[in-house]
Image: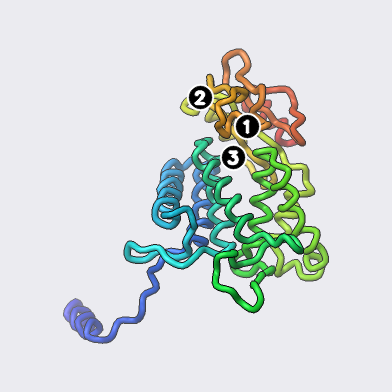
Amino acid sequence: IEGGKKALREAREERVHPLLDDKVLASWNGLMLRSFAEAGMALGRPDYLEAAVNNANFLLVHMKPEGRLLRTYRQGQAKLLGYLEDYAFVADGLLALYEATFDQRWLEEATALVDSMITLFWDEGEGGFFDTGTDHEALVVRPRDIFDNAQPCGGSVASEVLLHLALITGNQDYATKGATPLRAMHELMSRAPAGTGHWLAALDFYVSSPKEIAIVGPREDPATQELLDTVFGRFLPNKVVVGAEAGQSPSDDAGTPYSRLPLLQERGMVNGRPTAYVCRNYACQLPVTEPEALAAQLEE
């Protein structure tokens, strides 16, 4: 049998090999980035978080070499201008990675990517986003895909990212631009929910008064980790999570994202212990330091 297998393998190698598509797509990697970041926190898998960090570094170094996100990468070369879905998916992944790590770099990169997305793709006339940027080749009509299929469309993810980032940063322009397409899509969502699944998820986030959660404490402190496990260990799709290390002054004027985040303003540890704040519309409940108390607030 082994001899037969060897002969078959040798005969197969003499045939023309099928074509192999081994290019890297920015959009698909953005989807995977969010998946690894969320799974890493939900399942307590630091190896998943490490994979997410490595993925984010690769995208920013190799697929955004001169500030413009590119679409494909293969054999050491990135090329083709990124589309809306590339910007939206990667920004979404970076935002998830920030919430998983509280590393301000990922928040900065996500914000920069969203700002570029607005500049390149936003339709100033009717609102919403085009699929191609202002620097793409001129077409008779700029395309705008509005249906969620095997993967969500760029527009639905862009809306969700804008709404998410608006809560974290307090930027009302993000909130306005995130909500505008939802209003235009409401009739289609009611008639064709199977083709607008991610639009509906973005709408649910928008109308649900998402929980705004701030965790303040040293990341390596087991008590901080217990609070994080309480947040990420349950199904809370409509939430934003921000955090600061102990001793990091959110109210300083250093110009960092920490100093600008509304949810971290005047938020500190209670009695020197890692502390969680659960808020809605920036109105917070009493700070808690015990996982059980945090769980009770999250269930309300």
Residue type indicated by callout 1: Arg
Badge 1 marks a residue whose secondary structure is helix
Judge from the rendering whether residue 50 lies leftward or rightward of residue 6; answer left or right: right
From mark 3 to mark 2, how far is it between C-alphas?
17 Å
Judge from the rendering whether residue 176 lies leftward or rightward of residue 235; answer left or right: right
Numbered circle sitting on residue 286 = none
Residue at 49% x, 28% y is 219
Q: Nearer the viewer, residue 216 or 292?
A: 216
- Circle nearer the viewer, 3 or 1: 1
Judge from the rendering whether residue 125 lies leftward or rightward of residue 83; answer left or right: right
Determine the image quadrant of residue 267.
top right
Numbered circle sitting on residue 260 = 1
Q: Kindly identify which residue carries mark 2.
A: 218
Residue type indicated by callout 3: Phe
- Labels 3 and 2 touching (C-beta < 8 A): no
Residue at 63% x, 32% y is 260
- Circle nearer the viewer, 2 or 1: 1
Q: Kindly identify which residue carries mark 3.
A: 232
* Image coordinates for residue 194, horizontal then vertical, percent: 72, 68
Q: How many other residues sit within 10 Å of disc 1, few (<14), some (14-19) or many (≥20)?
A: some
Q: Total of numbered circles in the picture? A: 3
Residue at 54% x, 51% y is 93
Q: Nearer the viewer, residue 120 or 42?
A: 120
Badge 3 marks a residue whose secondary structure is helix
